[in-house]
Image (cartoon, grey):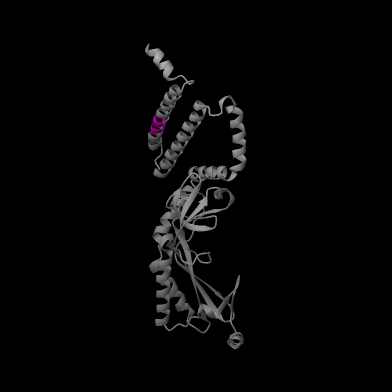
Amino acid sequence: MNNRLVAVAFELDSEWGRGAVTVAIAAAVLLAAWILGRGVSRAFEDPQQSYNARRLIRTAAWMAWLVSLVLIWRPLGGNLAPALGLATAGLAFAMQEVIGAIAGWFNITFGSIFRVGDRIQMAGVHGDVIDISLLKTRLMEVGSAGGNTWVQGNQYTGRVVTVSNKSSFTEPVYNYSSYFEYIWEELEVAVPHHGDWKTASLILEREARRQSESDGARQAMADVRRRFPVPAAEVEPRVFASADEDYMRLAVRFVVPIRSARSVKDDVIRQIHSSLEDAGIEIIATSVIQQSTNDWQPVSPSDTNDDDTNK
């Protein structure tokens, strides 16, 4: 008798049977997802990789349950298989962007391109990654010099930008903080040849050393070299000099953390200008120098007079 009841309960020709099978499959899928989730939590040491694997398992569980619903309830009767084939072909054509975005998610997640918290540039957008979903990545936008934002420094604009994961295949992805959370900054000043450019060079190097994060960058570079076959990079502050017929141009190069680059650069600029002023060293304002692709050309007095006349 009990066996007969069980057979009737799971008979797919009746609504009660289909309902019972649906509940049983749902319970089995949830149990399997829970067991697999516990397994991957122990298998992955990286919390981010573990989170991504659990999300993938949950998505697969939902898909399996939805497919089982279609097969059990057979909404199109005996024509289900041909209809599914046509629907699949149509969806594959119409959802190319979606399929590309899902493939991009696999590329981002299991290719370790970036993770939540990294500062990246993707599809022309600079920002910190705040979410990676199956179809899209959300960035807290960061302004950049020469960019399309009103904020020109490495600081938040307040906008959250959504980018399709497919962009990880079609455009380069720049990661500023995945392996090496530092960037090289440069400051340039122009000193007339009759000025004390040697003392100016010493001042630039001294102030850059005060603010530079050379020790941390050196350790980070050592970690990078253990993972990748890259040559050693110079992380100590250094001043480079070049000259034209009117000016001695000094460029100081130093390392700063990516997330505090603007504030550090601001401190260095203020200290350099204050120290040069105290030393009585004349520097040329950037507005007096026209910078082309390769060289700075001084503005002649005649050009300045012509501009004033035109105004």
Q: Position of residue 95 (x, y in %)?
A: 58, 43
Magenta-colored span: 30-35
Residue sitting nearer the eye, 237 or 181: 181
- Counting from the top left corner in percent of width and height, residue 150 is at 49, 67
Give left or right: position of 9 versus 95.
left
104 falls in the magenta region: no
**Could you say where residue 64 lies in the image, as x and y percent from the top left?**
48, 32
The single residue placed furthest to the top in the displayed view is: 1
Q: Determine the main secondary structure of the stretch shown in magenta.
A: helix
Q: Compared to 201, does 9 lie above or below?
A: above
Relative to the observer, which residue lies in front, 301 or 165? 165
Q: How many marks?
A: 0
Q: Quadrant of the N terminus?
A: top left
Residue displayed at 42% across by 38% down: 54
**140 shown above or below 62:** below
Which quadrant would residue 140 be assigned to in this image? bottom left
Where does the image place residue 179, in percent across and percent down from the top left? 45, 52
**Which residue is depicted at the point 60% across and 73% down?**
292
